[in-house]
Amino acid sequence: MTTERTVPPPGGLPPGRGLPPLSVIHPRGAGGGFRLPAGQRTARRRTTGLPLLAADAAAALTAAPVLPHPLMAAPLLLAVLCLNAGAALYRPAAVPAVLDELPAVCGRILVSWCALAAVVAALSPAHTLSARTMLTGCVLHSAASWAGRGVAHWYRRRTLARHPAAALVAGPAATARRVAAAFLRHPGCGLRPVGVLSDSGAGGDGLPVLRTDEEAQRAVVQNSVGAILIVGPAGEHTALLRKLAEAGCVLWEVDADLPAHHLAGGTAYDEAGRTPCRRSRRERIAGFSCRRLEGGRRPDNPAKRSLDVLLSGLLLLLAAPVLMACAVVLRVSDGPRVVFRQERVGRDGRPFTLLKFRTHRPADPHEAATRWSVAGEQNMSRFCRFLRRTSLDELPQLWNVFRGDMALVGPRPERPYFVGVFSQTYPGYAARHRVRTGLTGLAQIHGLRGDTSIEDRTRFDNAYIDDWSLWRDVCILLRTAAALVRPTGS
C-alpha cells in the first residue's frame, strides 16, 4: 500500500493547466480500442494438451501389469504427469513432432520408475521392484507413450495442413512479402497469410497491403484471422497488435534473417516501454525461427482474480473491527464525511471511484484532482497523520478489490489529471493500465512510494506485468505485510 506526498506536478505544468485528452483515459461507461462485432472473438485455434495427457495416462496403465500390485500404477501415473507438465510437454508445439520430444518423455518415464522403486523399497521391502521389472516396465511405458503421442501429433499435423489458420504479416513491406510467400509455399505449417500489415509499400503474391488500422480490423473480421506474424517494427500499428492479442490472436515474432542485435532490441511491439508480452521458447515454422509472444493480459487470469476475491473478502471480515474503530475515531475527531471518494484511472484507462479514509479536506474538487498531495500540511490532526503513516487510510480499498475495480497487487492507480501528465512525460506510463491497478505492487516494495521517481515506478510496474506469476503476487503481499509491521511513514 502506498500514499503520496507533496511534490510539484511533473513536467513543470501548473495545477490549473488543462491537458488534451489521451487515449489511455476513457469516459465512464465508454469502451475504447479494437472491438469485434457482437462480442465475437478472433478465430484462435485451441491447442489443448488433453490428447497428449490422455496418451501418457494410457501409456502408464499399459505398463501396470508388470508391477507387483496394480495400485502402484497410480503414483507412477501421477509422477509422469507432474514431470511432463513441469517441462511444458502438454503444450503442443506449433508444428508437433514426436521424435523431437522423445528424449524428454523417456527421461521422465525413467525418473518416475526410479522414484517409484525407491518409495516401494522404503515402505514395503517385500514388493521391491527387480531390475528386470524396471527394465520391462520402462520399455513398455516408453513405447506406449511414443505411440500415443505419435497418433496425437499426426492428427494435429493433418488438421493444420487441411485447415490452416488465417494470419496477417506485420512489419516492413519487403520483409513481410518475403515471409508471407514462404508461409504460403509451406501449407503444412498451419498458418496461411491473407494480408500484409505495413505503413507503406506495395503488396506481393496477391496479398493486400493493409496500411490503416481500419483496414486491418476489417481483414481480421472477414478472414477470421487467428494469428499475427511480426517480422519487424510494426510502426503505427503497435497499439492495434496489442488489441488483437487481447481479442484472441496469437502473436509470433519471426526471425526473418535479421541480425541478432536487431532481435535483441525487440520488435516495435515492445518499444517505448510497452512490453505487453512474454517470450517463450523458439520454434521452427516454415523454416523460420519463431517465438510466440504471450498475451499481455496474463496478470488478469482467473487464478489471480480468485486470489483477490478470497483474500480481500477474508481481510474485510478480519479488519472489520479496525475499520469500525478508525471510522468512529475519525468521526469524533474530525467531523462527518469519514470516507473519501476520488476518481482514479484503472484498467484500460477506465475511471473508477477509489475509497479511502479521509485524512484531509481539500479546498475544492479542483485541488483534490490536480494537487499531488497534501500529506505534509500542518493542519492535519494527529490521528489522521497516524492513519497516513501506517497506511490504515487505504483499508477501504479492500472493497475496491473485492468488487473488481482493483487487484491486491498491481500498479498503483492515479488521478486522471496526473495520468495525462505522466503519460506525456514518461514513456511506458500508459502501458501500466494493461491490467487492474493494485493495492500494492512491485514498485512499492522496492521503496518507490511517496516522493519518488515516477520513471522508476513506471519501469517496475511494467516489469511486474511482463514477468507476472501467481507466486510473485504472493511474495509481494508478504513483503508488503512485513513493511506494514515496521512503517516508515508515507
Image (spheres, grey):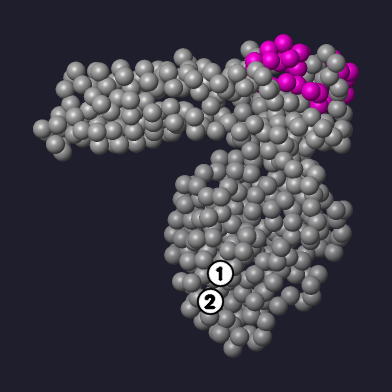
Direction from residue 7 to residue 466 in the image, left or right: left
Res 357 → quadrant: bottom right
Name above or below for residue 3 compared with residue 148: below
Amino acid on which the number 1 mark rests in the picture: Leu
Mark 2–mark 1 CB contact (< 8 Å):
yes
Could you tell me which secondary element the residue under label 2 belongs to?
Answer: helix
Q: Which amino acid does label 2 sit on?
A: Leu
Give, as a single range, the part of the protein colored magenta.
178-204
Q: Earlier in the sequence, mark 2 or mark 1?
A: 2
Q: Which residue in the structure is indicated by mark 1?
A: 395
Q: Mark 2 points at which residue?
A: 323
User: For the point 14% across and 36% down, which residue is it?
Assistant: 124
Q: Is residue 178 left or right of residue 453?
A: right
Q: Is mark 1 on a helix, strand or loop?
A: loop
Task: Kindly report the distance in space between the C-alpha atoms of the residues bearing marks 2 and 1.
Answer: 7 Å
Q: What residue sits 29% from the left and 20% below the top? A: 138
Give the image location of residue 136, x and y in percent. 25, 18
Residue extending farthest bottom: 332
Q: Quarter of the image for the N terminus: give it.
A: bottom right
Badge 1 density bin: few <14, some 14–19, many ≥20, Cα 10 Å: many
In the displayed structure image, the side of residue 179 where residue 101 appears, left or right = left
Where is residue 339? Give x, y as percent: 65, 76
